[in-house]
Every structure is written in C-alpha cells, then in structure tokens.
Amino acid sequence: MKFRTLAPVSQKPPCPPILGEESMLSNNWYRQVHRWQTHGSCDSVIFVHEEPGARFLANVNSSPRIGGQGGHPFDTMAADYDRQFTDSLIGRLMREAVWRQVDAKFREGDHVLEMNCGTGEDALHLARRGVQVLATDISTAMVEQVRTKTSISAFGDLIEARRMAWEDLNDLMGASVQFDGALSNFGGLNCVEDLREAARGLSRHIKLGGTVFLCIMGPRCPWEWGWYLGHGQAKKAFRRLRRGGVAWRGITIRYPSIRETERAFFPWFRLRRVTAIGALVPPSYVEGWAQRHPHLTTFLDRIERRFESHPFMTALADHYLLELERLP
C-alpha cells in the first residue's frame, strides 16, 4: 500500500469538537486528521491512503491500528466513514438504490439481522420505518459509532448493536433466534473467505420465506478499468479479476460473481432478484469527479435505476444487490 505525505505540523493548538460530537479515544487519531484538514491544528504527519473501495485519510504516527495491529482493519475507518462515503454524493445515490429494494420487503414490526452494519445508517433507516434491527459488525469501532448514533436517535430503542463477524453466526444465541430477514450492505461478504459456510450460518436464523439482501462488489467494473487505466495504474484496474483475491491489511478481499454467490447460498436460499448498484454511477473513489459533475452523476443514476435489473448492468456494476428467499 502506498501512502503520500501531505505535511507535518509542529504544534497542536486546542481542537474544538467537529459536527458537535465528542471524540472516542480509540478513534481520536482519525478525528485529529479531520481537524488538521479543517483547522490546521494537529501535530504529526498526515497521509492519504487509497483503500480497495475508497480513499481515506490516515495518521500513521498516532495510530497503532495501521497495518492490522491493535484492532480490526476497519476500526481505522469508523470515525471518518460517514464523511468519506455515507454523506458523499455517490454514497447517497448507492445507498438510496439499496433502500428502495429493502423498503419494499421489510415492514413495520419485522425483526432484521444486519451483518457488517458499518456506522449504522441502514439500521437507523430501517428503525425509522418501525423495523427492529440487530446491527452487527466485526469492527469494534464501527459498533461504537452505531451506539453513539442510536443513543441520540428517537428510534434508537429499535436497534441493538453488537460486535459479531459472519463466522460467529453459528454462535448467535443458538438456532432458536429467528429473523424475518437480513441485510449485508456494501461489500461485507467480500471479506469472508467461505461464502458457503456464511450461507449455512445465516440460514439457521432466517425464517422460512424470509428475505435476505446481499450487496457485494462484483468482479467486473468498467468504471474501475477506465479510471485506473486513465491514471496509469493497470494493476489496480484489473485487481478484481485476480485469482485468490486482493491482500489488504492482513485480510483478503474477494470479488465473487453473481453465479458464484448464488451457488454458495443454495440450497438454503433461492435467488429472486439482482439489482445493479454502481453500473453507470461511478465507484466511491471517483467522488471528486462526481462533485465536479453532480448533474451528470444524478442523470447516470436515473438511467441506471431504469435498467438496474438488466443482466448487462448487474454483471458490470461496482456492486450487485441480491435478493434471496429462505427455502424450506
């Protein structure tokens, strides 16, 4: 991984809280990076780091988590994830496309299991609609973000946040715990080595006929090919096609095809629908371009939504969204 030094800062004046939130100690270095960018106030060296799915800031000198030490790799993203993705133009368009499908299936009073919940945006959206959510994530820092949000939300009592990995599903309070459905958004399953075992574990906790939504990064993304080839980075352009996946901070990111995922989840689940998420809308690391061309970006989203279930679109999207039904 390559880091590019931006600047050292020798002195650190007092940093006021940003966005009216207090920093959590485990993620304070990320807050410092953001404050340095905004106020020019934090010491040590600031870096820009390109992750597999997005571009993030990092302060190597003050964080023991870089390189996978001291916590899960996604812990380092938690404090700044919403600014970098959730609140971005591309992030909003992609998430709204997922919500349109999810809202058509999950109703008030349903009990939904969310895997790799991130900072809890999807859980809060569902809770506002009266859905009860068990929001889980392998990252302790992400779970802390969810708890912070739910503590100030009028719908927080409908959300329980818990640290849990896909591999822990078999230990989820026994097979007696049943949910009306499940959601895994924005690539959580790309970090799971054994999709079939994940499917088996999930099947124990979904009621017969229940709906599961899986949003997964696919292996072919023309936007990625063109973007990185245009920037002279051929290796990155075709990284999703690499056999065995892409190593990143001690874990491996894999890019299964729709067919591979469907086979892994059968016979417990049946595929009902596939939706393209980011076929015409660019990936999140192209946010700078999207901000310069907001009208074109939203126009591309409208066209994508019209043809979102076409096989050509779903096969070439940044993410594909699977709607699965739990079988007897």
Image (cartoon, grey):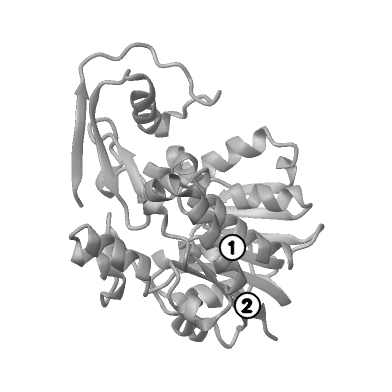
> Which is more foreground, mark 1 or mark 2?
1
Q: Earlier in the sequence, mark 1 or mark 2?
A: 1
The image shows residue 273 at horizontal and vertical percentages of 62, 79
Q: Check contact, mark 1 vs mark 2: CB within 8 A.
A: no
Q: Identify the residue at the far right of this view.
A: 109
Are there few (<14), some (14-19), or many (20+) residues within 10 Å of tag 1? some
Q: Amino acid at mark 1?
A: Arg
At x 72%, y 62%, the residue is 103
Left or right, 251 with reference to 149: left
Residue under circle 2?
324
Observer able to see residue 215:
yes
Mark 1 element type: helix
The image shows residue 193 at horizontal and vertical percentages of 38, 71
Residue under circle 1?
302
Left or right, 99 with reference to 37: right
Which label number is shown at residue 135? Answer: none
The image shows residue 130 at horizontal and vertical percentages of 79, 52
Give the quarter of the image for residue 81. Answer: top left
At x 48%, y 81%, the residue is 312
Left or right, 215 with reference to 306: left
Q: CA distance from mark 1 to mark 2?
A: 25 Å
| Quadrant that contains the C terminus | bottom right
The image shows residue 247 at horizontal and vertical percentages of 26, 63
Mark 2 element type: strand
Q: Judge whether 63 appears above or below 188 on screen.
A: above
Q: Judge whether 197 appears above or below 51 on screen.
A: below
Observer able to see residue 163:
no
Q: Amino acid at mark 2?
A: Leu
